[in-house]
Amino acid sequence: MSYALTQWRAETPGCATRLHLNNAGASLMPAVVHDAITAHLRRESLEGGYEAADSAEALIARAYADLASLVGAAPRNIAVVASATQGFALALSSVDFAPGDVLLTSSDDYVSNQLMYLSLAARRGVRVVRCPDAPEGGVDVAAWDALLRRERPKLAALTWIPTNSGLIQPAAAVGARCRAAEVPLLLDACQAVGQVEVDVRALQCDYLSTTARKFLRGPRGIGFLVVSDAALARGDAPLLVDMRGARWTDADAYALVDDARRFEDWEFPYALVLGMGAAARYASDIGLAVIETRAHALAQQARDHFSRLPGVRGLDRGVQLSAIATFTVQGRVARDLVLRLREQRINTSAQSRGDAVIDLDRKGAETLLRVSPHYFNTDEEIEQAALALGRLLA
Ligand SMILES: Cc1ncc(COP(=O)(O)O)c(C=O)c1O
């Protein structure tokens, strides 16, 4: 084992007792993240919650700076939110859709995002247009471009790395087309942040939503939304703002704050903010290029090993594949396999049709087993997990 790998594993106490291949669900927190959270909870218990937030002001500012530098933004562009879904919903709510307005998206967008599009269609008369896929999988960028020009969407929305397959969508190419057509882009980067290099300037998106708990290795219950300077300058704001996002200036008047905090709530889990900041710093210190290369190689190894097992079919398609490997197992319900593997302290996850109706139907799969390694996993762990699944299927 390399020196770096030994160190990453030593810094991740969960590695000692679990074989964790569910980083697309929630990763194992490194000790520095856990410590940042508990240190602030202790501060709150000793000083009082409001007083502790004041004492930790510099640490909180540093957390914003670390999140910003992780994604190539400035602290003024960062809004801390409860989840990727909440960030995505806040960004959607900042668009004043009128009946007949078009929202351009993909067939592989995340389930909750698809539900929000359908809700906008039902409640606001928005027309949801899904771009066709290229033959090798992922949106066809030329078709996306043509739809931008033909449909003049009010908003384009794309899930960069879907939850239900190994696909990586061509986010930067889509961003460039959206910018050229002057159509705002909302990018769901929930599975991307902490897994691949993210630079909002190169992506040319107006909004980017993400969570802490997945490949970033932060805590559950928190995420962040990146709001571009262009969106802030346009005066974009969520439909409903609170006293953090705006000032009540007169009986019938309010003024938005200048920065992305107009997307935040006043009440805040500061311990989790500090944990998420520590996770951003930890990932940046390791380097996203190193993380991406290792995680993607381990997922490819999982594809190779698992697909050789009898009755197992790999489901991943796309020009570029992520750290998520997915399989369907003939005659087996994936959730049952997940529970049987968990009995052996091997963490994986399962999805069923309702998690990705379009993708699972076209792949002819009822349920799927998802294996999502990260850079701290080892080659031996992938082999061990494949052996364990092989024994279950024998
Ligand atoms: C691609 C993608 N987007 C959004 C989400 C939702 O994230 P959250 O549960 O933090 O709202 C997930 C969660 O699995 C996801 O995989």
Image (cartoon, helix red, strand yellow):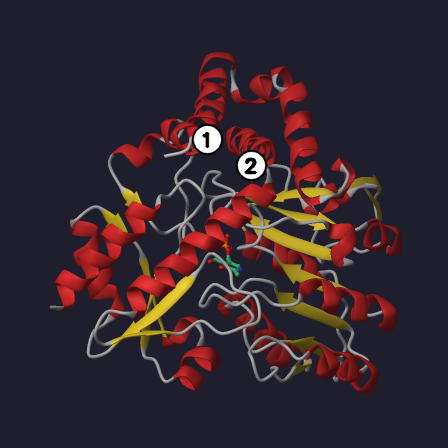
Q: Nearer the viewer, residue 323 or 221?
A: 323
Name the mark on residue 170.
Answer: none
Q: Amino acid at mark 1?
A: Ala
Q: Is residue 371 visible?
A: no
| Distance (Cα) linking label 2 and label 1 | 13 Å
Image quadrant occupied by the C terminus: bottom left
On the image, the x and y values in percent for residue 360 come to 41, 79
In what element is the residue under mark 2?
helix
Give the structural element (helix, strand or loop) at label 1: helix
Using the image as rendered, state which of residue 196 and residue 68 is in the foreground: 196
Vertical order, 92 against 212 (above or below) = below
Determine crowd level at label 2: few under 14, some 14-19, many 20+ residues with C-alpha closer than 10 A.
some
> Could you tell me the amino acid type at mark 2?
Ala
Q: Position of residue 191 (x, y in %)?
A: 53, 55
Q: Pinpoint residue 368: horizontal percent, then vertical percent.
A: 33, 70
Which mark lies nearer to you, 2 or 1? 1
Residue lying at 30% horizontally and 62% vertically, measured from the top left = 305
**Which residue is label 1 attached to?**
4
Q: Is residue 182 left or right of residue 294?
A: right
Residue placed farthest to the left in the image? 394
Which mark sits nearer the N-terminus, 2 or 1?
1
Q: Nearer the viewer, residue 220 or 119?
A: 220
Q: Residues within 10 Å of mark 1 (few under 14, many from 20)?
A: few
- When the figure is inspected, residue 376 is found, relative to residue 124, above or below; the finding is above
Which residue lies under the disc numbered 2? 283
